Image (tube, rainbow, N blue to C red):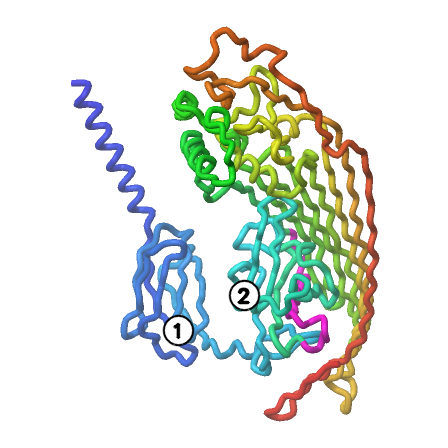
């Protein structure tokens, strides 16, 4: 009886939920036409972020059922500018699509000035801030990947603070140097990675003769970054934030311990130059190979962790007839995937444009960033950002990191040192107190004066601009390196004296874990205390003239 009651309650609850789900759906009808009022046949009407869509009929009409009132419809047609419309309380929607050819009147940033898109004959590509912010990345060099035709980005490291992508326009143009393009932010040369994605309004890429105005520096192309300004109206405060995780997409598959032992034996035994080969001490023995089938000291898997990232941005902007202002600050923090590695960065920018008179304008902008990166100091065999990953990945998995509390040297079958990398022990170097801390700051101050000759019948269309900027870059570094001790296991397990774990061929009368069986070897991990500081000051001054004037159906323009 009780089971029947429960069964009926379950069916009733299911029907209620289905009814509620069905009632939440909304049916929308509408019509799509062009600017002349002609219906558009075959226009696509899609519910955003779904595969739900319909096309308009011969009269331009459509009917579609969406999930709820929060849904957004995207209406598009070839040769027309697509529109996104939020459903809300609308049940019948009339859509007028504009001809995409109207985009020729848009203004494009070119060199030190602007041109209408219809007048541009060079190869120029643009990307907007919306496209950049759709991809949550550590910096803007990563955000433009795949978004601009002809622009190739290459990221060789995923380590926090070392993950800037290199940028090439239409491939490398020279064998000398890195072939990087010139980057101009609001007319001032700056490093691309110094700009917060939230501060960018648009990016233009000059690929050929369009970049000639910058001279020899433009041999590899030019990237022009235009930052955001305030919009007419009351002050607007906005916040954006994101949390994310970083992890490896894949990992190279390495030999397991048993496969490594067999391959090592095959290669060593086949070496024709080794005429005095001792097959007992030089090769893994049968009892050792059998034991290696159960060994899997995968240290990379042991220490690898999913990293966390977070990004927050706050800005305030606004404009009146006389003043335009924008101020913003952003924070980015990223943890490493291996060990004690942390990177964080602050970006800030404040700018104001003042209309001194009808024909005279002034601008002042202050921007910069401050970044800190901390990690353990590792000087054994070099200090590359990928060193930890590579050494843990390639370490044979029959070797444990420690035995009986003794951190081990990574000595192979010969039990002797063949290269410096065998002195590497991840746990020891992460916890011995040695560290490296880098602090980088950039301060940029720029100002400009603009004068418009619009009051003159003869000089109307002529605009003069004087700009001055100063950039201060400071790099500080603190490093401390000491000594550390690792141990050589003098007599190892196995009939061939090759393993660090027991086998069936061990000597039962020998104490392998005795303190006397471990020989300490002290290695210098830099063995120093250092503090460095490098400051670089750059100045830039420009005077430009731009002429733009319409004469009937003709448009004249130039700058210098």
Q: Is residue 232 visible?
A: no
Check the image and report above or below for 553 versus 125: below
Is residue 256 left or right of 470 when viewed as pictured? left
- Local packing at callout 1 (Cα closer than 10 Å; few below 14, some 14-19, many 20+) is few
The percent coordinates of residue 480 (x first, y second) are 77, 33
The percent coordinates of residue 291 (x first, y second) are 41, 22
Q: CA distance from mark 2 to mark 1?
A: 21 Å
Check the image and report above or below for 209 versus 176: below
Whether 219 is among the magenta residues is: yes
Foreground mark, 2 or 1, reads 2
Q: State which tag comes first along the sequence, 2 or 1.
A: 1
Q: Residue at x 40, y 52 (%)?
A: 69
The percent coordinates of residue 251 (x first, y second) are 47, 41
Specify the segment rendered in magenta. Answer: 212-237
23 and 208: which one is in front? 208
Residue ID for mark 2: 148
Q: Residue at x 56, y 65 (%)?
A: 151
Residue ID for mark 1: 78
Residue that extends furthest to the top in the rendered view of this protein = 509
Q: Secondary structure at mark 2?
A: loop
The total number of labels drawn is: 2
Is residue 344 left or right of 265 when viewed as pictured? right
Q: Secondary structure at mark 1?
A: loop
Check the image and report above or below for 351 versus 439: below
């Amino acid at each position: 009886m009780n089971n029947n009651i429960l069964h009926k309650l379950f069916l009733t609850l299911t029907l209620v939920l289905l009814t509620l789900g069905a009632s939440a759906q909304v049916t929308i009808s509408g019509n799509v036409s062009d600017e002349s009022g002609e219906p558009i046949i075959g226009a696509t009407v899609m519910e955003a972020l779904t595969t739900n869509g319909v096309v308009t009929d011969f009269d331009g009409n459509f009917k579609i059922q969406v999930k709820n009132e929060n849904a957004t419809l995207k209406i598009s047609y070839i040769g027309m500018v697509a529109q996104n419309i939020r459903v809300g309380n609308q049940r019948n929607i009339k859509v007028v699509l504009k001809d995409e050819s109207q985009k020729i009147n848009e203004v494009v940033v070119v060199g030190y000035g602007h041109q209408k898109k219809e007048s541009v004959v060079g190869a120029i590509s643009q990307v907007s801030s919306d496209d950049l912010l759709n991809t949550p990345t550590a910096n803007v060099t990563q955000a433009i990947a795949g978004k601009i035709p002809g622009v190739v980005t290459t990221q060789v490291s995923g380590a926090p603070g070392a993950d800037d992508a290199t940028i090439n326009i239409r491939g490398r143009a020279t064998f000398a140097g890195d072939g990087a393009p010139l980057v101009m932010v609001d007319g001032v040369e700056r490093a691309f990675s110094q700009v917060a994605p939230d501060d960018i309004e648009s990016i233009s890429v000059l690929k050929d003769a369009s970049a000639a105005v910058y001279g020899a520096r433009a041999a590899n192309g030019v990237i022009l970054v235009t930052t955001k300004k305030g919009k007419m109206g009351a002050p607007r405060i906005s916040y954006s934030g994101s949390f994310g995780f970083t992890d490896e997409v894949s990992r190279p598959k390495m030999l397991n311990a048993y496969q490594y032992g067999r391959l090592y034996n095959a290669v060593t035994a086949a070496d024709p130059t080794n005429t005095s080969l001792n097959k007992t001490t030089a090769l893994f023995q049968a009892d050792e190979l059998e034991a290696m089938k159960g060994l899997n000291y995968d240290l990379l898997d042991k220490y690898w962790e999913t990293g966390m990232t977070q990004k927050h941005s706050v800005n305030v902007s606004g404009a009146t007839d006389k003043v335009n202002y924008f101020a913003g600050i952003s924070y980015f923090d990223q943890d490493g995937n291996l060990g004690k590695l942390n990177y964080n960065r602050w970006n800030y920018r404040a700018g104001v444009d003042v209309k001194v008179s009808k024909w005279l304008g002034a601008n002042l902008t202050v921007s910069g960033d401050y970044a800190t990166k901390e990690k353990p100091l590792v000087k054994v065999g070099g200090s590359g950002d990928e060193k930890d990953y590579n050494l843990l990945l390639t370490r044979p998995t029959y070797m444990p990191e420690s035995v009986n509390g003794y951190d081990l040297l990574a000595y192979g079958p010969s039990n002797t040192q063949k290269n410096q990398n065998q002195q590497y022990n991840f746990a020891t170097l992460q916890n011995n107190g040695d560290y490296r801390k880098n602090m980088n700051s950039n301060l940029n101050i720029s100002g400009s004066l603009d004068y418009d000759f619009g009051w003159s019948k003869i000089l109307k269309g002529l605009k003069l601009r004087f700009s001055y900027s100063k950039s201060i870059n400071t790099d500080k570094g603190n490093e401390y390196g000491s000594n550390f001790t690792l141990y050589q296991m003098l007599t190892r397990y196995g009939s061939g004296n090759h393993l660090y774990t027991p086998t069936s061929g061990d000597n039962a009368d020998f104490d392998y874990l005795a303190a006397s069986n471990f020989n300490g070897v002290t290695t210098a991990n830099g063995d120093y205390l250092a503090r460095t500081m490098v400051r670089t000051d750059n100045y830039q001054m420009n005077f430009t003239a731009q002429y733009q004037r319409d004469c009937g159906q003709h448009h004249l323009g130039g700058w210098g």
